[in-house]
Amino acid sequence: NAGVTQTPKFQVLKTGQSMTLQCAQDMNHEYMSWYRQDPGMGLRLIHYSVGAGITDQGEVPNGYNVSRSTTEDFPLRLLSAAPSQTSVYFCASSYSPTGSTDTQYFGPGTRLTVL
Amino acid sequence: AQKITQTQPGMFVQEKEAVTLDCTYDTSDQSYGLFWYKQPSSGEMIFLIYQGSYDEQNATEGRYSLNFQKARKSANLVISASQLGDSAMYFCAMREDNQGGKLIFGQGTELSVKP
């Protein structure tokens, strides 16, 4: 199993550009989520999905869109990039949609810089 | 109010000694899970250990153990026989059953192991 994969690893955008961060998992996990990590802070939840066709907002959803058309993929879209979105983005997945006992496994992260 | 609090921004430990990283949490849920993740300088998030709210025994995984004190709402990570490779950021996180599986992170503790 490849686990959770993310592309690209690094990206530089100009203010106002749009892009999609890709996330895929091959573990047949129902639950997928996107976090951002800013310097000196823990990870904060952006959006999450409990299964194909179902998404919901996390703590910091503004400026981001998601969709979940398949179990495997959960892309994150930046509609109009802003410097405040400069961050490291992590995708995570776990088997259970809601179980507190279920470990979330993280992808390697995407380092995004918005100029 | 902070749901997860890690009060030690940075810690030093001598190689081969044990170290305790503190984590306190706040929840009114009866069913929840507590997790510790390691983030080395390379940036990936590595799952270390998990403790369920109904688990009566403290979790252990190799050199890692979780000192779970439910009444005090603390879930401290103990690393025995520290190694140079343990130098990293350590994050405590909580997942509540009634919150759709969201993982809430603390701000992290940076551990440095001295030779």
Image (cartoon, coloured by chain):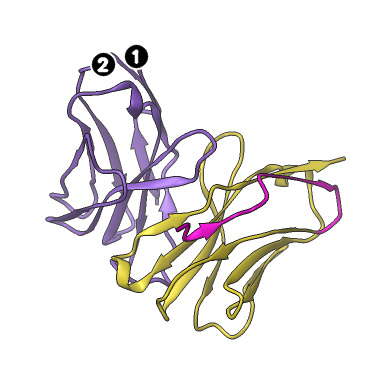
Residue at image mark 1: A115
Residues under numbered marks 1 and 2 in contact, where contact means CB atoms less than 8 Å apart: yes
The percent coordinates of residue B53 (x first, y second) are: 50, 78
The colour assigned to chain B within the rendered structure = yellow
Residue drawn 24% across the image and 51% down it = A72
Magenta: main secondary structure: loop
**Would residue B56 appear left or right of A88 to someone viewing this image?**
right
Disc 2 on helix, strand or loop?
Answer: loop
The percent coordinates of residue A48 (x first, y second) are: 26, 53
Asked if A68 appears above or below A111 in the picture, the reply is below
Q: Mark on residue A18?
A: none
Disc 1 on helix, strand or loop?
Answer: loop
The colour assigned to chain A within the rendered structure = purple
- Between A67 and A8, which is closer to the camera in this rendering? A67
**Would residue B65 appear left or right of B15 to someone viewing this image?**
left
Asked if residue B10 is among those painted magenta in the image, a careful observer would answer yes
Residue drawn 57% across the image and 73% down it = B73
The span picked out in magenta is B1-18
Of all chains, the one bearing label 2 is A
- Between B66 and B21, which is closer to the camera in this rendering? B21
Residue drawn 61% across the image and 75% down it = B72
Residue at image mark 2: A15
Circle 2 packing at 10 Å, graded few (<14), some (14-19), many (20+), is some
CA gap, disc 1 to disc 2?
6 Å
The percent coordinates of residue B105 (x first, y second) are: 48, 53
